[in-house]
Structures are given as structure tokens and as C-alpha cells.
Amino acid sequence: MTYDKPTSYCVKCLYPYYNLGGGKCSRPIGYNKTCNGGIRSAVGPDDWKDCEHCSKKGNVDGKRCEVCNGARYVCTRPMQ
């Protein structure tokens, strides 16, 4: 089975998104807090790699993978 790769990511926490970028990240990072990084487009052929932590399943032991956040792919771009 193939899965669509994310199309954008947060430059601060690398959280994957499936929209074309723009705006601010809304990933929860603690009690009553969210990340405030910007979202950038990442549609290049080398922008994403398969998540090795969850073997591209999206979960580990029944819980969402902490490395790829359940997206099955990991952003290869550097954090800013």
C-alpha cells in the first residue's frame, strides 16, 4: 500500500502537513501551548524519507509514532 507524502512542514518542529504551506504551526507542544513555527512547502523528491522508527506504519505498539507523528515519512530538511 502506498501513502501520500506530506506537502509541507513546520520549520521549527518539522511537523508534517498535507497543505501547501503558509500560516503557523498548530502542533501541541505542552499543556495549553502550541508551536508557533512557520509552515513551508516541501514537495521536492528528496524532502521526505520513510520513517525507520515505525517502519512506515505510522504507529509503534498501538501509539502514534513520535518520530513521524503518524505521517509515515520524516522531513529531511533542516530545522531553523
Image (cartoon, helix red, strand yellow):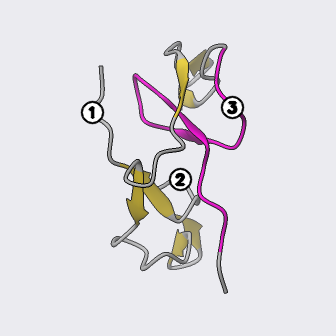
Question: Which residue is under mark 3?
Answer: 20
Q: Which of marks 1 and 3 is in front?
A: 3
Magenta stretch mostly in which secondary structure? loop
In magenta segment, residue 74: no
Question: Which residue is under mark 2?
Answer: 69
Q: Which of marks 1 and 2 is nearer the N terminus?
A: 2
Question: Which residue is under mark 1?
Answer: 78
**Residues packed near mark 1 inside 10 Å, few (<14), some (14 to 19) or many (20 plus):** few
Residue 67 visible here: no
Say if 27 sits above or below 49 in the image.
Answer: above
Locate the N terminus and report the quarter of the image it occupies. bottom right
The quadrant holding residue 67 is bottom left
Residue 33 in the image, given as x and y percentages of width and height: 57, 17
Q: Which residue is drawn at 42% across and 80% down?
A: 55
What label does residue 33 carry, if any? none
Task: Give yes or no for contact between labels 1 and 3 (Cβ–Cβ under 8 Å).
Answer: no
Task: Give yes or no for contact between labels 3 and 2 (Cβ–Cβ under 8 Å).
Answer: no
Looking at the rendered structure, the kind of residue marked 2 is Asn
| Magenta-colored span | 3-22
Say if 25 sits above or below 9 in the image.
Answer: above
Q: What element carries label 2?
A: loop
